């Protein structure tokens, strides 16, 4: 029997840290080729080469549907042939520049929950000093920005059931300081693979 498999994992190899806290204090800047907004319904639509910036947070896509709820929180749905997101994470080690990257056909940013949901051909990666450390792919990935946690969900593609597989590199034998040296070789990877009967 073929089943859809859901895998939850933490992207916490180097540090238990969320997004750069100073980003929340920065203004949100949105640029696009076209804008239409309705103040009564608190909705706005941006189309054509959409760019969103807030501190280190950066998003790109073809269309952004923005809604503000009664509490004043924003929800943005960014779509495109490839919609992208990136943001720097807080890291206590000043020698490490740590970033989260996401891409997919649809990105849903929920400001109240502080999550990014990546839908269709999704990929979520973490880099340190430009070096890939963790990667997840799936039909749906939910990334908790505040707590640096993510959940990847398999699905079906071409009528074939797919599941989430996680690969984690072994710990180096002499790993006393995991922030330098051999830690550059640490890498865990999550990919979607066909669910084969055994």
Image (cartoon, helix red, strand yellow):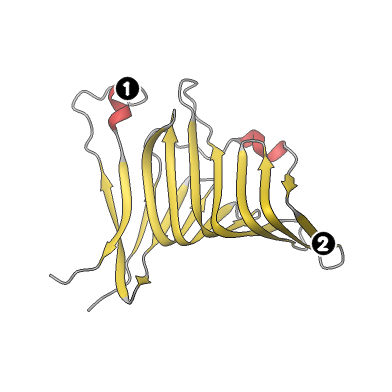
- Secondary structure under the numbered disc 2 in the rendered image: strand
* In the rendered image, the vertical position of residue 191 relative to residue 168, given as above or below: below
* Residue at 23%, 33% in the rendered image: 171
- Cα separation, mark 1 vs mark 2, equals 52 Å
* Residue at 46%, 20% in the rendered image: 95
Q: Is residue 151 left or right of residue 71?
A: left
Q: Estimate the x, y position of residue 102 in percent, counting from the top left.
A: 49, 49
Q: Which residue lies furthest to the right in this view?
A: 40
Q: Is residue 167 left or right of residue 99?
A: left
* In the rendered image, the vertical position of residue 49 relative to residue 12, given as above or below: below
Q: Estimate the x, y position of residue 191 in percent, counting from the top left.
A: 32, 54
Q: Is residue 152 left or right of residue 175?
A: right
Q: Estimate the x, y position of residue 46 in percent, counting from the top left.
A: 73, 58
Q: Which image quadrant for residue 180?
A: top left
* In the rendered image, the vertical position of residue 193 relative to residue 26, given as above or below: below
Q: Which image quadrant for residue 178?
A: top left
Q: Estimate the x, y position of residue 197 in percent, counting from the top left.
A: 16, 72
Residue behind mark 2: 37
Q: Residue 177 carries which label?
A: 1
- For the residue pair 12 and 107, the one nearer the viewer reads as 107
* Residue at 52%, 40% in the rendered image: 18
* Residue at 42%, 57% in the rendered image: 151
Q: Residue 90 carries which label?
A: none
- For the residue pair 36 and 27, the one nearer the viewer reads as 36
Q: In this view, does 48 lie to the left or right of 173?
A: right
N-terminal-most mark, 1 or 2? 2
Q: Residue furthest bottom?
A: 1
């Amino acid at each position: 029997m073929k089943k859809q498999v859901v895998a939850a994992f933490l992207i916490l190899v180097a540090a238990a840290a969320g997004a750069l806290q100073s980003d929340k204090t920065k203004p949100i800047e949105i640029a696009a080729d076209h804008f239409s907004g309705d103040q009564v319904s608190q909705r706005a639509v941006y189309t054509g080469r959409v760019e969103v910036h807030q501190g280190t947070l950066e998003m790109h896509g073809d269309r952004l549907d923005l809604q503000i709820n009664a509490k004043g929180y924003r929800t943005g749905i960014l779509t495109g042939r490839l919609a992208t997101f990136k943001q720097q994470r807080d890291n206590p080690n000043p020698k490490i520049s740590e970033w989260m990257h996401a891409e997919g056909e649809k990105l849903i940013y929920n400001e109240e929950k502080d999550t990014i949901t990546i839908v269709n051909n999704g990929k979520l990666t973490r880099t340190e000093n430009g070096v890939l450390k963790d990667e997840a792919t799936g039909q749906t990935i939910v990334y908790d920005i505040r707590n640096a946690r993510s959940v990847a969900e398999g699905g079906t593609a071409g009528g074939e059931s797919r599941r989430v597989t996680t690969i984690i590199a072994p710990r180096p034998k002499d790993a006393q300081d995991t922030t330098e040296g051999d830690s550059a070789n640490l890498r865990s990877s999550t990919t979607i693979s066909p669910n084969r009967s055994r």
